[in-house]
Amino acid sequence: MPSKRLSVTVTRRLPDAVETRMRELFDVTLRDDDTPLTQDQLVAAMQGCDVLVPTVTDDINAATLARAGDRLKLIANYGSGVDHIDVATARQRGILVSNTPGVLTEDTADMTMALILAVTRRIPEGLAVMQSGEWDGWAPTALLGGRIAGRRLGILGMGRIGQAVARRARAFGMQVHYNNRRRLRPEVEEALDATWWDSLDQMVARMDILSVNCPHTPATFHLMNARRLKLMKPDAVIVNTARGEVIDENALTRMLRAGEIAGAGLDVYERGTDINPRLRELKNVVLLPHMGSATREGRIEMGEKVLLNIKTFDDGHRPPDLVVPAML
């Protein structure tokens, strides 16, 4: 008799190619709509499957895991960040957690550079003028931005994405500086032509542009708090394509309104979709709807990693992208 197929539940709509392959391999429950599950729906999904495939919009905390029951054995996250999953509690309950690292590195780095250019060159303001029909021709002093060549870029978090941003920044003629939990190996540092700062405070105070590329952990929550934001130069710009919780959003908003920071480009927000309304009103801010990783290629590659993690687990082996608490 054929062995029983693994029961997999997916919490959000995924690309058609990924969903089709899941149907072929597993007994899969998919979503017809694309709204986030409520916590009660999430618990019910966890109780009824062997493998859960969540996304960043699912809050899998200790309380949720306590209600998960005994059937769930793997949380195969669709995404690289796992700050929405209590990995330690999951492991204590015998539930493995996997993710999809490395897939979205280039896409997110592209978006980081796009935001740097958008803020420094005032691209959204120019777009608004054109869409309003109010443009009456070129003028020598109209919409003057700043040149990025020669500027100091400080990268906060020099992992895969931070290094990809550094490579792009060098191509634009920027000076690359970075702060990280661990200093890069000399050969990597040399290849990126990157300058290491042991003190984040000292780096922040000297940068023209600061790019946040570190994960959200208890240690990085509000890493850019009010005190550290005040260290930035008044003509500096901050860009965040990592996690919104790394920046104190209210403090940033106050400083942008007061002209104490020149501009910001944000793709992520401290409270998800609940964005400070005063932030939306500022002309020196570019806001994007968490689309840094939104490429067709990236989303499919994420799905392929999820499939590989589940299939490897189903075959009785350790998922290749297993997340353990020591990694966080």
Image (cartoon, helix red, strand yellow):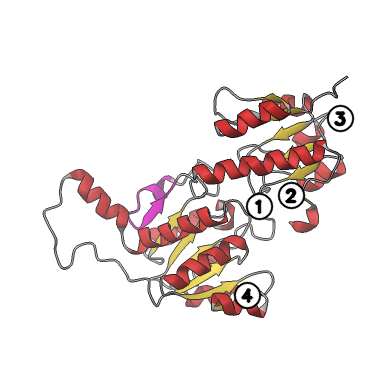
- Please tell me which residue is depicted at 81% across the width and 34% down the height of the picture: 66
Residue 145, image quadrant: bottom left
Q: Secondary structure at mark 2?
A: loop
Quote the CA–CA distance across marks 4 and 1: 20 Å
The numbered mark, 3 or 1, whose residue comes first in the sequence reads 3
* Disc 4 to disc 1: CB gap under 8 Å: no
Q: CA distance from mark 3 to mark 4?
A: 45 Å
How far apart in space, not on screen, are marks 2 and 4 (Cα)?
24 Å
The secondary structure type at the circle numbered 4 is: helix
Q: CA distance from mark 3 to mark 2?
A: 23 Å
- Of residues 302 and 134, the one drawn nearer to the viewer in this rendering: 302
The crowd level at tag 3 (other Cα within 10 Å; few <14, some 14-19, many 20+) is some
Which residue is disc 1 drawn over?
Answer: 101
Which labelled disc corresponds to residue 70? 3
- The magenta-colored residue range is 277-288
For the C terminus, the image quarter is: bottom right
Q: Quadrant of the N terminus?
A: top right
- Give yes or no for residue 280 being in the magenta stretch: yes
Would you name the residue on which mark 2 appears? Answer: 321
Q: Is residue 125 left or right of residue 161?
A: left
Crowding at mark 1 (Cα within 10 Å: few <14, some 14-19, many 20+): some
User: Residue flagged by tag 2: what amino acid is it?
Assistant: Asp
Between disc 3 and disc 4, the foreground one is 4
The percent coordinates of residue 99 (x first, y second) are: 69, 46
Q: Mark 3 or mark 4: name the one nearer the start of the chain.
A: 3
Do residues under tags 3 and 2 come within 8 Å of each other at their CB atoms?
A: no
- Mark 3: which amino acid? Asp
The percent position of residue 260, horizontal first and vertical second, equals: 40, 67
Q: Element under label 1?
A: loop
